Image (tube, rainbow, N blue to C red):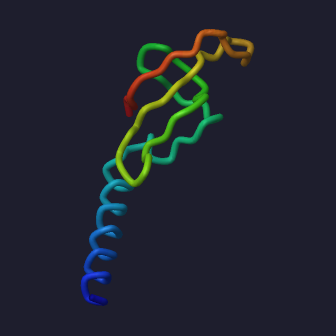
Amino acid sequence: MFNNFLAARRIEDTVADLQREFGGPCYDWTPGMRVMHPTDGLVELVGGAYLRNGRVSNHWSWRRVKKDGSLFKEVKSGYGWA
């Protein structure tokens, strides 16, 4: 039983390492960060996560950033683009 636990733990660690390595920059994103969107330019993340319940979600909500640094009212959402 203990060996099964250790094997499962090694698999979880390996999967986490792969997600960090291949998840791209969006792996480290958190709401409140400002990141570049391919069509919307600079945006501020207002919600979302790369991982949810140990599974890849990579779904985000964002607002475009105005030139003065304030945010547009409209909230957009979609899957990670990085």
Q: Is residue 38 left or right of residue 12?
A: right
Q: Is residue 53 above or below residue 78?
A: below
Number of labelled discs?
Answer: 0
Q: At which x and y percent is residue 44?
A: 61, 26
Q: Residue at x 31, y 83 (%)?
A: 6
Q: Which quarter of the picture shows residue 50?
A: top left
Give the image location of residue 47, x and y in percent: 57, 32
Q: In x, y percent, where is residue 73? A: 66, 10
Farthest residue, direction front = 1
The vertical placement of 14 against 51, above or below, is below
Q: Is residue 49 left or right of residue 79?
A: right
Query: Going by the image, does 49 lie left or right of 23?
Result: right
23 on left or right of 35: left
Q: Residue at x 31, y 81 (%)?
A: 5
Q: Where is residue 23 shown, x and y percent of the image?
A: 35, 47
Q: Nearer the viewer, residue 7 or 16?
A: 7
Say which quadrant the C terminus sits in: top left
Of the 4 image quadrants, the one containing the N terminus is bottom left
Q: Residue at x 26, y 88 (%)?
A: 3
